[in-house]
Image (tube, rainbow, N blue to C red):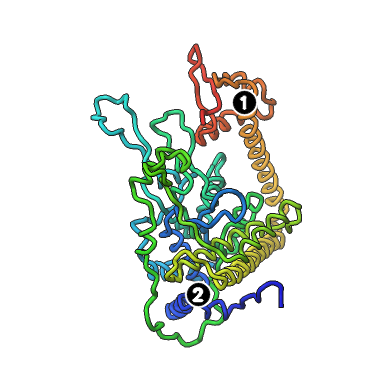
Amino acid sequence: MTGEPQLMNEEEFWQSSAQRQYIRGYARYTRTSPDAVLGATLARVATVAPPNVVTPALVGAYPSGLAVYVAVVGNSGDGKGLAEGVARKLVPDLLDVGETLPVSGEGLATLFAGRRPLPGNDGENRSRGTELYCVNQRALLSVPEIGSLGATMGRTGSTLEPVLLSAWSGEPLGGQNVDENKRLRVPAYGYRLNLITGVQPANAGILADRDGSGLPQRFLWCTTRDLGAPNTRPPQPTGTFTFKTDRLKELQPTSLTLNVLYSAGARERMPLLENGGDPYPLHVMRYPDEVYEAADRDRVMALHDQRPDGMNRHSLLLTIRVAGLLAILEQRDDLLAVTLDDWKAAQWLVRHSIGTRERCISEGRRMCNRKRADRIADGIESKTLGQQMAEERREREQQRRLQRCVDWIPGYLQDKDPNRVGVPVGTLRNDLTKADRPYLDKAIDVLLQSGVIEKRQGERGGKRYALADM
């Protein structure tokens, strides 16, 4: 019989792997959710996986990384933090990586890159400058509540959301600062950023409302619920959880190799070894033919504009990554080989994730509607709702005009200043519409921080701006 392979069900998912059996047993022994514990565990596995361990170029020209973002869904007190603590018990060794909160998009680059004086710089001769080096090759962002992440992303001019999107895709991070000694750039394949956050349904809109950028689609959504949990606490599972980080540590690049990569800025610009070999080889995971076929079908549908609308456009790539992490979790003799069972398990888990996400978003919307109905019943909604809607309209309009300025300035500079001498700020202001002019200074700050433009010194000390030298 031909056709698609039989899909896994939930019980087959947990029973078809000794590792997953142990995770479910240990979660139930500790009275936590197996789903949430598994999600947090996969985030920790992705963290210890070196940045040069990648999935193959199933489509396109370049291999992809294994970064994973996990959203643990539950109300206050449901055990989001407990599940992360159990995962920490199962995978305690993150190879000296700290768990931190994201402060800003620009700040994420400092987790991986730093600058230090060039060799021979004795402190008196500052003309030798500094060099870029790798501070750390991996990081795990731990955000107990999505609200704190949303507050940071919601600040006017914040670059946190686009940086998180870039980091998930494994793209270079950092900007082109005017001062070379302050430039921090993190090259592709030279870092691995993962994230775990707790999401209460009431706050699900913080992610759901960003579906246009693809942010919620990139998350693996897990629930704190376990409807199959026994009434009597089961005993601790026998045996031990066999995942060890040492095998992954053997694959990671040396500090010296990473520093050369950071200095060069990209693998392609690194000097070849004396024997002509690759100076920064990638460890490419191996997938069954069914995965290549699925990736090809997905790309044909995208090219034909036949993909379904909605939040599932990244589900295939997420499934590919989850399959790789599930394979690494097994720690078979062939560490980087993904089996067909791994692939089918990843398909079940991502389908389960999509269902969890949709239920969370729907519940959050129902809660918002109930609160609004309560306010109307109390007779206070008519005035405050109108004020709230007017304020929201003003904020949206301000954000829209700021974004218009941010989008307009680079194109204007490209056309008017191809030699990058710099355009006076007054000229920029005069060529903007009157309605957009109040947002020019903030737009310039955003573009300066992200390294898109640079400040130039005018002949009489005035401010001039040009596209940054990439």
Q: Residue 330, position in %: x, y?
A: 45, 71
Q: Quadrant of the N terminus?
A: bottom right
Name which of mark 1 and mark 2 comes first in the sequence.
Answer: 2
Residue 69 appears left or right of 181: right
Q: Give the label, 1 or 2, closer to the camera.
A: 1
Which residue is under mark 1?
Answer: 414
Residue that extends furthest to the top in the rendered view of this protein: 460
Kind of residue at badge 2: Pro
| Horizontal and vertical percent position of residue 337 | 49, 66
Q: Nearer the viewer, residue 34 or 129?
A: 129
Q: Label 1 is placed on what type of residue?
A: Gln
The quarter of the displayed image where residue 313 is located: bottom right
Q: Nearer the viewer, residue 144 or 211?
A: 211
* Number of numbered tags placed on the structure image: 2
Please give the name of the residue rendered at 51% of the width and 49% of the height, measured from the top-left corner. 170
Disc 1, SS: helix
Point 69% across, 72% down: residue:
4
Report how far apart the C-alphas of labels 1 and 2 lie in the structure: 53 Å
Residue that label 2 marks:
34
Q: Residue furthest front?
A: 275
Label placed on residue 209 = none
Residue 292, quarter of the rendered image: bottom right
Q: Are marks 1 and 2 in contact (CB under 8 Å)?
A: no
Spot occupied by residue 228 in the image (x, y as percentages of width and height): 55, 82
Q: Position of residue 349 (x, y in %)?
A: 58, 69
Secondary structure state at the residue bearing disc 2:
helix
Q: Is residue 178 above or below residue 348?
A: above
Q: Residues within 10 Å of mark 2 (few under 14, many from 20)?
A: many
56 horizontally vs 261: left or right: right
Residue 77 is at least partly visible in this image: no
